[in-house]
Image (tube, grey):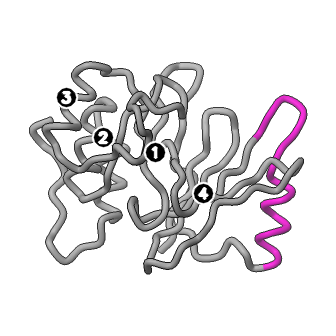
Amino acid sequence: MNNVHKPAATRARWSPQLLNDLARAPDLATAAAHLGASAVPVFPCVPGGKRPLTPHGFQDASTDLSVINSWWRHQPDANIGVPTGTAGGIDVVDVDVHDTHSGYAAFEHARRAGFVEGWAWMVRTPSGGLHAYFLRTDHRQQRSWQVPGKHIDFRGTAATSSCRPPRSPARTASVAATSR
């Protein structure tokens, strides 16, 4: 973790360089440290999942590199959790794909209606779903929501997004697109 991303003082927390650093991080501990060094709070989640390994979940998120390093030293396979909303600087639309259902039709409907414009980057999830990340530009509350039976939800204020799923031959995530 010696080559941890150091953002310029005036640069936004989430930058193209940070996304590059995350994509090239050799392990989850390094990726978590890149986020913390960029003022993006993180917390460990169960390997391959979203359930927090800390007692208070996203409320325990930290940018303190000594805390982050300690968490990942104790649980090197921990997935990375990031609080959504103002705390993490992002909101996320989560399109789920299950054996018999997909949220892509609902996402396309929202796209045609202009509800999912302005995303910063999209990540294909291990299940074939999609996370569309939106940079948080103000302190307004954006409540989390989901559309019952449509397999799509929005993670805004006081929610969690897993930032980078663990790598494995069978289940990987990849950046699907970035905005200009």
The residue that label 2 is drawn on is 31
Where the N terminus falls, by quadrant?
A: top left
Q: If you read the primary sequence from the N terminus, does the residue marked by circle 4 or circle 1 appear first?
A: 4
Q: If you read the primary sequence from the N terminus, does the residue marked by circle 1 or circle 3 appear first?
A: 3
- State the SS at label 3: helix
| Residue 120 image offset from top left, x and y in percent | 50, 67
Q: Say which residue appears at 36% left-offset and 54% top-offset.
A: 19
Q: Are marks 2 and 1 in contact (CB under 8 Å)?
A: yes
Q: How many marks?
A: 4
The residue that label 3 is drawn on is 70
Q: Say which residue appears at 54% left-offset and 29% top-offset.
A: 49
The residue that label 4 is drawn on is 155
Q: Is residue 21 left or right of residue 172?
A: left
Q: Residues within 10 Å of mark 2 (few under 14, many from 20)?
A: many
Q: Say which residue appears at 61% left-offset and 33% top-offset.
A: 126
Residues under labels 2 and 1: Cα distance? 9 Å
Most distant residue in the left direction: 2
- State the SS at label 2: helix
Q: Nearer the viewer, mark 2 or mark 3?
A: 3
**Residue 156 sits inside the magenta stretch:** no
Residue type, numbered disc 2 = Ala
Residue type, numbered disc 4 = Arg
